[in-house]
Image (tube, helix red, strand yellow):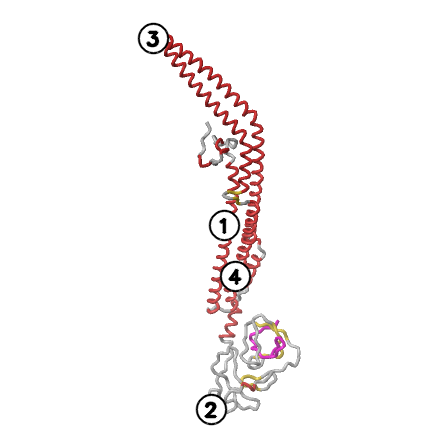
Amino acid sequence: MRLQSNSDDMSHHSDDGMLVPGSDSFWEPGNYKRTTRRIEDGEKLCRDLILLVQERSNIEKEYAKQMKTWSTKWNSIIEKGPEYGTTEAAWKAVLVEADRRCELHLRVKDNLVNDVVNSIKNWQKDNYHKQLLQLKEKKEMEDQFKKAQKPWAKLLEKVDKTKTNYHLACKNEKTAVNQERNATKDSSLSQDQVRKLQEKVSKAQEGVKKCKENYELALLDISNYNSRYQEDMTDVFERCQRKEAQRLQTFKDTLFSIHKSLNVCEDPALPQIYDEFYHTVNNADHEKDLRWWSNTHGVNMPMAWPQFEEYNVKPAVKKTDMNGAPKTGTTSINHNSDFNSSQVDSNGVKDANPFDDESEEWDDGGAYALVDNGEPGVAVKALYDYEAAEQDELTFKSGEEFEKLEDEDEQGWCKGRKDGRVGLYPANYVEPV
């Protein structure tokens, strides 16, 4: 027995009226539609794969955005916080890693969108063409299957019809035989009635014989056509297989492209990120940080210790320049001193108390200008950042190198040259190269 298919699966065309699938076999009428439906499924799978990759790219984008927000937030907190020196740099290495990973995941997102998604879309556009309510490729394959199956389906219809007639004739024959047998045992029936029943049996037997011949003839016809039918259907089926093989290989290549885009382990930037992260943390030196703290905020800071001062209307001397000439104004290394020490000028006279209300205004315009004599210097490297407080001072960042032109004076200042400019800098902010 072949199972009857739902009427909804059948076409409204007259040619499809005979294509009623009776079993799960591909060779049954209409069962080729499972193969042609695969074309429609392939187009849908393209859309699904595009959506899958787009959603993953959005995840990469959102992840990068959240890491950037987190990094910016904590960078501000660390800069405003109490941590300092090389340990602060180690804290920030965590944020640098996040920023670099952010860039890496944005590249992943771009690769997924620009390479993978566009590749699928272009392949989908080239291989699937919408035509009215269905795909052109599916309709073409179905038309070829119908053409190959139509002659065999007609023969099958004839076989089914002759089989039905033969079975019905056998049933009628059996009924007539039973009636004739019962009549011979019934004495109430006349001879004429019994004879008619016997004729009916004979006629039924002739009908069975004729129907059987027709049935066998129909089976012979379809058996002779089976090889041609199989050949034609196989040819169309192989074309569908080749098209599906192309889709499967394309999807495999696409999935490899997704793997390549997502496999950040293969990105040469990744080991660099963590090498730099490791070295920055490894460079955290508590002894250097403590030394900086001592120089900047601790016992190694310069101090203008109180000394006896005679009343004098002359302005206080800030520091002696490298040539021994007095310079006016006040500055200390930490730039936070609330008072300045009294100094003795070249004539042996002490300066006036700078906090005396009767002292004169500071004369900044009289600062001594340092001159570059072109003498060779000694290379030094900055240990910490220093921002010039006055025009005769040098500004530098930690790690920068420049020249020391003269040794440290009594107040802890050196004369140096940086980027062609001569100026003063605190001696304990550098070390020899």
Residue type (three-letter) at the residue carrying disc 1: Leu
Of marks 1 and 4, the one in the foreground: 1
Residue type (three-letter) at the residue carrying disc 2: Glu
Q: Where is residue 39 in the image (x, y as percent from the top left)?
A: 53, 41
Considering depth in this image, is 190 or 24 the residue closer to the camera? 190
Q: Residues within 10 Å of mark 3 (few under 14, many from 20)?
A: few
Location of residue 148 (image quadrant): top right
* Labels 2 and 1: the sequence-earlier one: 1
* Labels 4 and 3: the sequence-earlier one: 4
Of marks 2 and 1, the one in the foreground: 1
**What is the secondary structure assignment of the residue under circle 2?**
loop
* Labels 3 and 1: the sequence-earlier one: 1
Which residue position is annotated with label 4? 99
Q: Residue 358's mark?
A: 2
Q: Residue 187's mark?
A: 3
- Give the residue drawn at x 55%, y 83%: 319
Which quadrant: the C terminus? Answer: bottom right
Which residue position is annotated with label 1? 51
**What is the secondary structure assignment of the residue under circle 3?**
loop
Q: Is residue 180 above or below residue 18?
A: above
Give the number of callouts: 4
- The Cα–Cα distance between marks 4 and 3, rounded to whole angstroms, is 111 Å
- The Cα–Cα distance between marks 1 and 4, rounded to whole angstroms, is 28 Å
Q: Does the magenta stretch include residue 421?
A: yes
Give the extent of the magenta segment.
415-433
Residue type (three-letter) at the residue carrying disc 4: Asp
Q: Which residue lies furthest to the left in this view?
A: 188
